Amino acid sequence: MSSDITRGARARARTEITAAIKDEARRQLAADGAAKLSLRAVARALGMVSSALYRYFPSRDDLLTALIIDAYDSLGEAAESADAALAGAPPARRWSAVCEAVRRWALAHPHEYALIYGSPVPGYSAPQTTVPPAARVGLLFLRIVGDAHRAGELSAPELPPVLRPEAERMAADLAPELPPETVSALVAAWAQLFGLVSFELFGQFNRVVEEREEFFRHAVARLADGVGLPRG
Amino acid sequence: MSSDITRGARARARTEITAAIKDEARRQLAADGAAKLSLRAVARALGMVSSALYRYFPSRDDLLTALIIDAYDSLGEAAESADAALAGAPPARRWSAVCEAVRRWALAHPHEYALIYGSPVPGYSAPQTTVPPAARVGLLFLRIVGDAHRAGELSAPELPPVLRPEAERMAADLAPELPPETVSALVAAWAQLFGLVSFELFGQFNRVVEEREEFFRHAVARLADGVGLPRG
DNA sequence: GTCTATAGGCGGATAGAC
DNA sequence: GTCTATCCGCCTATAGAC
């Protein structure tokens, strides 16, 4: 992709306006939710007329898709850079750091979090282009656990025989070099991590959990145990 | 509360119409989501005029509140009757049965699940009347764990010192007879349970987990371990 | 690329007659 | 309790001029 300098002013303006549209749309997402995201309201806020937006996004759903991809990428980047800052650290420490980065990102971007991990937007079906960004955090966890495995540090989680074929299928799809029981446990821990974040963010911890950071820290450390990571 | 027979025809009709409004609203919830729930559309579907609905629900938000309370109660009842069917069984079996009842209810009522455990509805703030119904499932888990405790069957989960004051506060609020480390672990397991259900329901398990029932069953059994319940 | 204008809808809420 | 009528607002999307 060419830089802003080598591209013409026209292309540069287009990039800037596209960014401005997404920024304003994110603002409205926070105020009214994804279901009510409206091209007209975005246009009004930008001093444009609604029909002009169709030159940038062919439909409301395409704008929504762009926001979803940006949100997954923003979260993925937050998680990846938290991990990169701990290069060479024990896997359990990287695990915890990434979990905490996920939580921090969610607290800082609650509406974008709701967009990607909350209720599906009625009538909207995410296209395949959202899949790779959506997979970033999961793949990062697989890399961390993979590093532990290569170092011979992984203990094998329990796996009932009835679940073995499924675990083998998941491992073949996601990480053929890892033991199936590890992959299965990791997928469960991944879902449980987001359960903790969602409960905090969506208000289920109100009047129940007060010291949320410490509570979360301990819970994700126990999740790491469940996956078989050695304590850092 | 008097029965339908002792009340007048007027009151009976009112009850029936109120139920019909809520039924139709639930249908629309499934189609368009909570954010777009509209008194007008409900009225249209029922062959009423929109202003007539205001005799039953003073505002759109009151209708939404009624649906939320019904959803929590419906889930609570499903969970409680799953537990009641296992009276006298080992706590770990009751735990699993309740978790599976929660999942089954969620799969059968995905939009009502999204209403209560998904993203908050923008602009809507749940009144205090939703709190008791919302607490039913959590209280049921506390009873199951309390029974195990009284039977001397509970093992104490790990608890880092930094979390002890918070755990003691939670225990004092929720179940003073239980060890604080147990209460803290239970709250975490509770959030993680809903993480598993939400991921399945909201599509994060698509192309990842296929044998969802077995996967879930194993995961919640490990959650029971984490709380300190003896294996059933 | 942006504008005006337009088509063809939708919503919450209230007043006042019956 | 239900009706009509009304206020005042909102939306997606397109056509065609500039």
Image: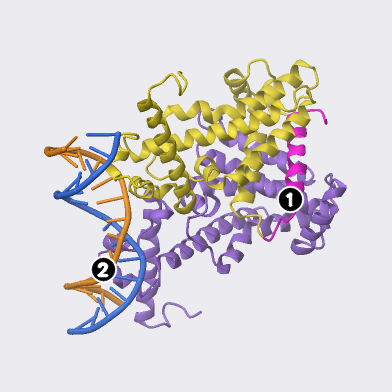
Chain colours: A purple, B yellow, C orange, D blue
How far is disc 2 from disc 1 in space, using C-alphas? 48 Å
Identified at 77% across, 57% down, the residue is A146
Q: Which residues are magenta?
A: B207-232
Q: Tell me if residue B224 is in the magenta stretch.
A: yes
Magenta span dominant secondary structure: helix
Amino acid at pointer 2:
Val
* Residue B50 in the image: above or below residue B210: above
Q: Chain of mark 1?
A: A
Contact (Cβ within 8 Å) of mark 2 with mark 1: no
User: Can you give x and y, in whole percent of width and height, for residue B118 in the image?
Assistant: 52, 45
Residue to which mark 2 is pinned:
A49
User: Which is more toward the observer, B79 or A140?
Assistant: B79
- Residue at 69% in and 54% down: A141
Element carrying mark 2? loop
Mark 1, secondary structure of its residue = helix
Q: Residue farthest to the right?
A: A161
Height in image: B127 above or below D4? above
Against B6, residue A220 (above or below) is below
Q: Residue at x 30, y 72 (%)?
A: A52
**Is A45 positioned to the left or the right of A229 in the image?**
left
Q: Is residue B62 left or right of residue A45?
A: right
Q: Which mark is residue B188?
A: none
Q: How far across and how far down the image is residue B109, in percent? A: 57, 44
Graded by Cα atoms within 10 Å as few (under 14), some (14 to 19) or many (20 or more), the crowding at tag 2 reads some
Q: Quadrant of the C terminus of chain B?
A: top right
Question: Measured from the top left, where is residue A226 in percent x and y?
Answer: 76, 42
Label 2 or label 1, whichever lies nearer to me, is 2
Can residue B73 be found in the magenta stretch?
Answer: no
Q: In percent of the image, x 30 and y 71: which residue is there?
A: A51
Name the residue type under label 1: Leu
Q: Which residue is mark 1?
A: A186
| Residue A159 spot, x, y in % from top left | 84, 46
